[in-house]
Image: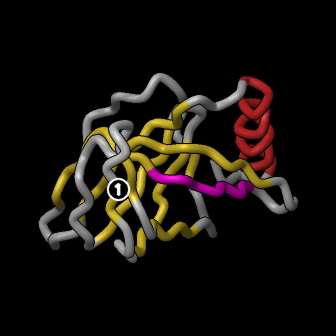
Amino acid sequence: MQEKRRDRRLPIFSMKLEISSLFKQDNEVIKNLDAPIEVQNVSKGGIGFSSKTDIPLGYYFNACIQMGHDDAKLYCVVKIIRREIGKDGTIFYGCEMVGLAPVFVSLFDEYANELEESDLL
């Protein structure tokens, strides 16, 4: 996949998310989606994940991100902006975080430092 992010992607080793509902700004909602996803990477600007479920572009979902070994969690809204279908049918999605407060950006820097100290990056 062509690199389109402004910020460095950080690998994720233990994060899992599940999308249960999607919404659009015009109050269009898709409920009971039950789409298990596997997070591939995260950056200050977004999340990359894969899923076998066909999820429409342009929709938003609420996410809770926990990086590293501490209990700090980041709750944010994520917009699905692109997808690419793999040879095995798995779909890779690129998402951007919407309205992330600048104070939370430091969590990504701390996580990157933790990965570098562990020689995982």
**Does 53 appear in magenta?**
no
Residue at the far front in the pictured view: 27
Identify whether 94 is placed above or below 56: above
Residue 18 placement, left or right of 54: right
Q: Amino acid at mark 1?
A: Val
Q: Nearer the viewer, residue 98 or 118?
A: 98
Query: Picture coordinates of residue 118 (x, y %)?
Result: 77, 54
Residue 16 placement, left or right of 113: left
User: Which range of residues does the magenta coloring cover?
Assistant: 61-67
Query: Picture coordinates of residue 49 (x, y %)?
Result: 41, 57
Identify whether 73 is placed above or below 14: above
The reply to whether residue 94 is visible in this rendering is no
Mark 1 sits on what residue?
29
**Does 65 appear in magenta?**
yes
Give the residue at x 32% y 62%: 30
Give the residue at x 79% y 48%: 114
Query: Picture coordinates of residue 56 (x, y %)?
Result: 23, 53
Give the residue at x 35% y 56%: 29
Quadrant containing the N terminus in the rendered view? top left
Give the residue at x 64% y 57%: 64
Query: Picture coordinates of residue 51 (x, y %)?
Result: 32, 68
Q: Tell me the SS state at disc 1.
A: strand
Quarter of image, res 95:
top left
Crowdedness near tag 1: few (<14), some (14–19) or many (≥20) residues, C-alpha within 10 Å: some
The reply to whether residue 116 is visible in this rendering is yes
Q: Nearer the viewer, residue 99 or 50?
A: 99
Magenta stretch, main secondary structure class: strand
Q: Nearer the viewer, residue 118 or 24?
A: 24
Residue at the far left in the pictured view: 87
